[in-house]
Amino acid sequence: MNTLMNSKTQESASAAQHTQQPAHSVKTLKVSGIAMVLLLTQLTACGGGGGGDDSSPAPAASTPTTTTTTPTTPTTPTTPTTPETPVDPDPETPPTEPTPPATSIDDLVVDADFDLQAAFNLAISVGLDSTKRGYFSLCDQYEQNGAEITVNFESCLLRGALNEGSLGEDLLVANHQQHLVAVVWFYNGSDPIYQMWSYDMEADEQTLTIN
């Protein structure tokens, strides 16, 4: 009997222990929940404060102003003006020279013996007593050094072959060509004949003769 009672007593005690354990567990969960709520509240308060600081506008960076100084151009010194020459209130007027009357070609006076032509006629006559074949040249550019004469044959006014030692021509020569040289060449290599000619102011006709 005692054994049966002890057995029931142990069962009751065991059941009481099982009943007390769930109640203790519920209390522990409640305490833990309250602690979590407090912790979240603190975190929210901290986070809100930080967010409030971030939302404040940042101060705008000021742009430095640049001041440019323009160099001033030095002023050019003014040139002193030349004082005006005083004017004589009663200057003497120089006498005016008479203007010569205008002349025309009709007013020109020309000597009767003066020839206004720009050229003159030169009568050329070559008559050699020779049957040798020859050639005649009349030029206006030459140099004479004693007995030696150098002729520029590019400046010849007349060239022509002799016909049995003879040649006759009338040549129109410009007035400025008043000194000429005549040359007769021979084909057989004989020495050439040179003859100088100059304009004759006293002659009625200008002639060049080689005999």
Image (cartoon, rainbow, N blue to C red):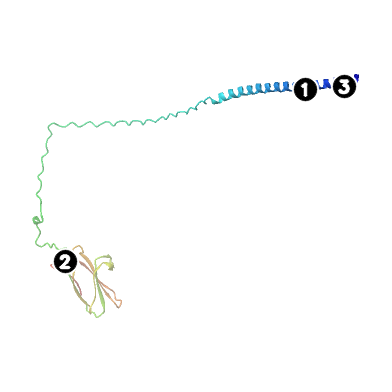
Q: Position of residue 130 (x, y in %)?
A: 23, 79
Determine which quarter of the picture holds residue 25.
Answer: top right
- Location of mark 2 (residue): 120
The type of residue carrying mark 3 is Ser
CB-based contact (under 8 Å), mark 3 and mark 1: no
Image depth: mark 2 or mark 3 in front: 3
The type of residue carrying mark 2 is Phe
- Location of mark 1 (residue): 21
| Disc on the earlier residue, 2 or 1 | 1
- Identify the residue at horizontal 78%, vertical 22% (top origin): 19
Determine which quarter of the picture holds residue 175.
Answer: bottom left
| Disc on the earlier residue, 2 or 3 | 3
Numbered badge on residue 7: 3
Q: Is residue 106 left or right of residue 169?
A: left
Residues at marks 3 and 1, CA–CA distance in whole angstroms:
21 Å
Q: Nearer the viewer, residue 70 or 73?
A: 70
Alpha-carbon neighbours of circle 1 within 10 Å: few (<14), some, or many (≥20)? few
- Identify the residue at horizontal 60%, vertical 24% (top origin): 47
Q: Position of residue 139 (x, y in %)?
A: 24, 68
Image depth: mark 2 or mark 1 in front: 1
Q: Is residue 61 above or below residue 161?
A: above
Q: Position of residue 208 (x, y in %)?
A: 19, 70
CB-based contact (under 8 Å), mark 2 and mark 3: no
The residue tagged with tag 2: helix, strand or loop?
strand
Screen quadrant of the N terminus: top right
Residue 147 shows up from this direction:
no
